[in-house]
Image (cartoon, rainbow, N blue to C red):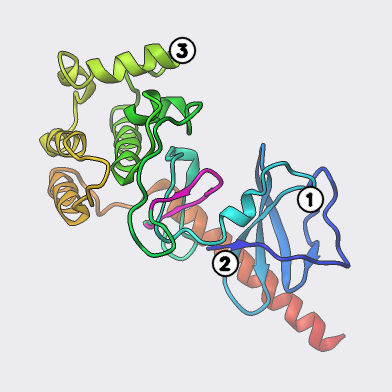
Amino acid sequence: MGTVCKDNSENQVTEAVELRTGYRILDYKVVRFIARGAFGAVYQVDHINTLPFALKLESNNAETRNLKMEAVVLRFIHRDIKPANFCMSLENPRQLVMVDFGMCRKYVNDGGELRHPRWYVTGLKGTVRYAPLAAHHGRDSARKDDLESLFYVLVELLVGTLPWMTMDDPVHVEHSKQVARTVGLRDFLSGCSKQLVHILLYIDNLRFYDAPDYAMIRGLLHSALESYPHDTAFEWEEEMRSERRKSEYLRSKEEVELEDG
């Protein structure tokens, strides 16, 4: 899985950023439409020699060139962690792939040193439901803040809701997130393993410059998984295998037709 970002002078993308199935861009063929957002559109494409890819397109007239920001993500914080920005790997239906790096920001300078936080950040960056408290307070994001957003996503997937799920006002959402850490902690993590309490306390005690102990967090998550059955197939696994077989069949059929033609 990857993001294809190439210019094609012979096939200019229209302003509406729409491609039909079978459309070719260099060595890539459009298989299906996946999603559309303010950035443009995303399609599944097949490469003639490699695995399927995700192709993201945006208008040449876009005010913010998000694709340029997505070219390199090493040493970046995402700043918009949410369920919609994860998908399952086509190769491994149990491997999550993070996507959409349009809001990411580098947390180190060109010399590899940690950047100092800005005094104030205008506007709440990210999605209100999963935004860290730092974003609500107008503070610069750090590595710990991506972990906080990811924690909210995990709780929502486990419990099915968040205390602030129906709230629209960022001020009310921020207050609810504060309550969830104190008198509302039991309700917030109701039905969750005790390891999640330790993870939340650890994240909240991190400071801007701290490097999170990812190994420790993974260890706690693995420990929590021991009480849940995780050796059964997920509902999407068979569908993904079926789609893969279909894609391989169509690709081999096209290769035979090219040889015969």
Q: In the shown orientation, is residue 239 left or right of residue 183?
A: right
Q: Residue at x 72, y 49 (%)?
A: 58
* Separation of residues labelled 2 and 3 (CA atoms): 46 Å
Identify the residue under disc 3.
169
**Residue 78 point in image, percent of width and height:** 44, 46
Q: Residue at x 22, y 48 (%)?
A: 210
**Residue 182 point in image, percent of width and height:** 16, 18
Q: Residue at x 68, y 73 (%)?
A: 251
Figure check: 168 above or below 122 = above
* Separation of residues labelled 1 and 3 (CA atoms): 34 Å
Secondary structure, mark 2, is: helix
**In this view, which residue lies farthest toward the bottom?**
259
- Counting residues from the start of the chain, the first of labels 2 and 3 encountered is 3
Q: Nearer the viewer, mark 2 or mark 3?
A: 3
Secondary structure, mark 1, is: loop
- Please tell me whether the stretch drawn in magenta is mainly helix, strand or loop: loop
| Crowd around label 3: few <14 · some 14–19 · many ≥20 (10 Å) | few
Tag 2: residue type?
Arg
**Which stretch is magenta?**
95-107
Identify the residue under disc 1.
60
- Counting residues from the start of the chain, the first of labels 1 and 3 encountered is 1
Identify the residue under disc 2.
245
**Residue 44 point in image, percent of width and height:** 64, 57
Q: Residue at x 11, y 34 (%)?
A: 194
**200 in magenta:** no
**105 in magenta:** yes
